[in-house]
Image (cartoon, rainbow, N blue to C red):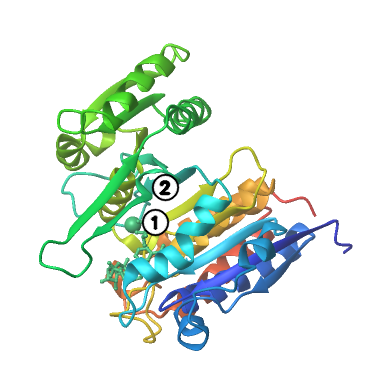
Amino acid sequence: MPVTEEFHIAAIPGDGIGCEVVPAAIEVLQEIGKRLRVRFQFLTYDWGSDFYFKHGRMMPPDALDQLRVADAILLGAIGHPAIQDHITLNGLLLPIRRAFDQYVNVRPAILYPGVSSPLIGVSPGQLDFVVVRENTEGEYAQAGGFVHHGNPSEVAVQVSVFTRQGVERVIRYAFELAGRRNGKKRVTSITKSNAQGYGMVLWDRVFDEVKSDYPQVETESLLVDAATVHFVRRPQSFDVVVASNLFGDILSDLSAALTGSIGLAPSANLDPLRRFPSMFEPVHGSAPDIAGKGVANPLATFLSAAMMLDHLGLPEGSALLDSAIRDVLREGRVRTPDLGGHSTCREVTEEVMRAVRAGISAGNTLPN
Ligand code: NAD
Ligand code: IPM
Ligand code: MN
C-alpha cells in the first residue's frame, strides 16, 4: 500500500521509565502508521541525565533548533536522583514548553471501564474531565534570585508572573474546549485570590470577562484548597478545569490518582496556534523507584501518543489507539502492578498491539 503522508516525530525518552515507555509507544505508533498508510519518521534524542553526566548539560546548545522542524515531540520523563531537579527540568523540559510557546497543557482525567477509582461509589463514565493548565508563566516564570547566596542571611525571591495575555489565552482555550467536548459544557476556574491578591485577582477578572463571550457554557470559580475537596467529593461535576501552572500541576496528579493510576494520565503541551511543534508526554515522572524493572505502565504514554495523532490530523489513528487501550483495560487480563496486575511494560505493549490489529480486522473506522 502506498504511503500517503510522512510525519517527523522527535522522540526524547529522557530518564528512568521514560526510556521504557517511549520506545514502547514508538512500536505502537509504527503499527498504527502502517494501517493508516502514513509514515512516522522518529528521530530519537539521547538527551537527559546521562547526556548531562557526559556533557555537563541536559541537551546540546542547538537542541531547540533541532526540535523546531519536527511535526511533534514525544517525551518520556526527566529527572535523576543524583541531579537536583531544578537543573534537569530547567535544562530540558521547561525550556521546550517556553521556547515553543506551548501555552496550554491539556491533561484529561478519565476513569476507564475495568479500572477502579480509589473513590468509593464512582464508576466509569462518571469521571471524565480535563485539566487545562497554563504552561508558560505563572508560578513557573523562573523570575527571581538569591541574595546573600549561601550566607545565614540568605534571601530567595521567587516571583510569579501573570500577564493578561497569558491568562486570557489559556482561559479562552478552556472555553473553546468545553464547547467542542461532548461533556457538560462547564468550565471551572481555580485560583487562590483570597491570599494571592494580584496575579490570581487578575486571573479571576479575566475569567469573568471571557465567560461573557461563551453564554452557552456554565461556569464556576473555586479556591484551590476547596477544589481539592470537590475533586474528591464530586468529581462527576467537572468538565473542563482551568488553572495556573502550579495549581494545574498539582491538581492533575490528584485527578490522575482518582482515575486509578498516574500510569494512565496523558498530557499534551500545545501551541494551539501551530507556530511550533507541540509536545506529548505522560503526566508522570521518571519514577526512579521502579525504573529498570520493566514494570512501568506504558498506557499514559500511549494515550499521550493518541493525543498526538489527533493533533497531527489523524483522528482515525487516535480513535484506533484509544479503543485498543480501552479494550485492554476492560478485559483486565494484562495490567501492570500500579493497576493491581502482574504484567510487564512489554506484555502490556504487546497486548495493545494485538488490540490495535484486532480493531483493524474488526473493521474499525479505518479505510482500507
Ligand atoms: P513520579 O511520577 O515519577 O512517580 C510517583 C509515583 O508513581 C512513584 O511511586 C512511581 O513508581 C509511580 N509511577 C509513576 N509513573 C508510573 C508508571 N507509568 N507506571 C507505574 N507507576 C508509576 O513522581 P516523582 O517520584 O515525584 O518524581 C520522580 C522524578 O521525575 C523527579 O526527578 C521529578 O522531578 C521528575 N518528574 C518529571 C516529570 C516530567 O518529566 N514530565 C514529571 C513529574 C516528575
Ligand atoms: C509535570 C511535572 C513538571 C511540572 C516538573 C517535572 C517540572 O511535574 O509535567 O507535571 O511541574 O510541570
Ligand atoms: Mn507534575
Which numbered tag is attached to residue 273? none
Give the left or right position of residue 8, taking residue 16 as reference. right
Of residues 187 and 236, the one drawn nearer to the viewer in this rendering: 187
What residue lies at 36% left-to-right and 78% top-to-bottom? 80
Q: Quadrant of ligand 1?
A: bottom left
> Quick one: 180 or 285, which is closer to the camera?
285
On screen, residue 275 versus residue 49, left or right, reads right
Residue occupying image coordinates x 27% and y 45%: 123
- Looking at the image, residue 258 lies above or below residue 86: above
Name the secondary structure under disc 1.
Answer: loop
> Could you tell me if residue 346 is visible in this image?
yes
Tell me whether circle 1 and circle 2 mark residues in contact (CB < 8 Å).
Answer: yes
Camera-nearest residue between 192 and 253: 192
Q: Amino acid at mark 1?
A: Ala
Q: Is residue 328 visible?
A: no
Side of 290 relative to 89 (left or right): left
Dot 1 alpha-carbon crowd within 10 angstroms: few under 14, some 14 to 19, many 20 or more: many
In the figure, residue 189 lies in which quadrant?
top left
Q: Quadrant of the N terminus?
A: bottom right
Residue 23, x across and y down, in percent: 56, 76
Q: Which mark is residue 107?
A: 2
Identify residue type, mark 2: Arg
